[in-house]
Image (spheres, rainbow, N blue to C red):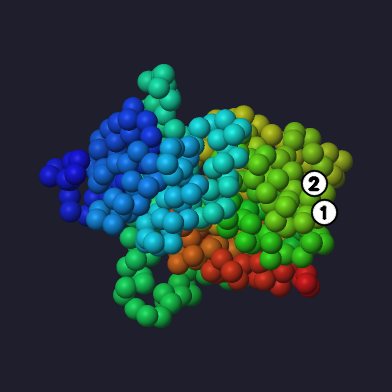
Amino acid sequence: MRGAMTKPADAIRVLIVDDSAVIRGALGRIIDAEGDMLVATTAPNGKVALDALKYTPVDVVLLDVEMPEMDGLTALPLILALYPDTRVIMASSLTQRGAEVTMHALAMGAADFISKPAAKTGSATLAAISVEIASKVRSIGRSARGVRHLVSAAAHPPVPVRTELLAARSSDAPIRILAIASSTGGPNALSDVLSALPADFPLPILITQHMPAVFTGLLAARLERDTGRRCVEAKDGDLIKPNCTYVAPGEYHMIVQTNEGLPYVRLTQTPPENYCRPSADPMLKSIASIYGASTMAIVLTGMGEDGLRGCREVHQRGGRIMVQDEATSVVWGMPGAVATAGIASSILPLPKIGAAIMTQCGVTA
């Protein structure tokens, strides 16, 4: 057991599954460099990983896709079924093929993905990848433990968030646009929410999901398949049309501007905000400046606080803000930040958000 003697008893325990000893070593060094996490064990394929899990409890599995004997896509549903308290993060290569497989894994229940370090990764890129890996393992590992605590503490659902954290509705202006922010766990949450809306849902929907460029087009295609409504990876200059969903492309902030009263998408590569590009804050601020009280902002599962400043702007202009609750979030960072700031109009479990959108937008099924 690597690092067990020098780490605290509550350190996040990680299983690394990859057929490359070089990659296992690289990931192991990243994990063991963190004071609050340790590599519990490693495995060269899914079969060995499942055997290891019988005897070694872990919080997070870092799972490669292509491995001999049992690959990651075969192992993933077995791990989730046999060890439901364990979270799985896929190790993805940033290629079209890697992105397609990883999106499939997310749909199957993986919590998130990390960029897999390559053999010749430069020092600056490796440092950025190391920060990404450590942050995701920490957030997802802690979240998994929080869910276990909630389940073991009582047989009934968690107590609802205190009502004093809910902002009073400041306007009854009709909603004219939805803006959704999401990150860790977001692809599945987005699919659940948008699939609950009717195919003829009339309002435009803008989405900022934290993802690299190679993934966001695939996310838009998946949402179009799941919802039966037009969904595109946004392009600079796209007119914002009814009954259409726009996904911010990786490496670009998506904001809204107007030309002769017509709203359209502007893509920018201004510096990252909240360490993210795309970031939800620029999107939300720009929408609030144009649509004002007719804005509905929705913040779904995700780590960090991206979206908080944008939601403050929505709130100040009389718009409505809906956030996902802690119990149904993979990580209650982004929605939790908005909820605890006291600017959310409603805090709801994921299965109820779609219906609440329809009610507040005056849409019937």
- Residue 242 is tagged as 1
The residue positioned farthest toward the front in the image shown: 69
Residue 119: x, y in percent? 40, 22
Residue 321: x, y in percent? 60, 62
- Residue 61 is tagged as none
Residue 117: x, y in percent? 42, 29
Relative to 332, residue 282 above or below: above
Q: Residue at x 55, y 62 (%)?
A: 323
The residue positioned farthest toward the bottom in the image shown: 156
Please give left or right for residue 300 compared with residue 18 in the image.
right
Q: Nearer the viewer, residue 131 or 18?
A: 18
Q: Residue at x 45, y 64 (%)?
A: 326
Q: Nearer the viewer, residue 257 or 154?
A: 154
Residue at mark 2: 240
The amino acid type found where label 1 is placed reads: Pro
Residue 191: x, y in percent? 64, 57
Quarter-wise, where is residue 192 in the image? bottom right
> Visible in this render: residue 162?
no
Local SS, label 1: loop
**Badge 2 local density, few (<14 within 10 Å), some, or many (20+)?**
many
The amino acid type found where label 2 is placed reads: Ile
Please give left or right for residue 90 compared with residue 182 in the image.
left
Q: Nearer the viewer, residue 226 or 35?
A: 226
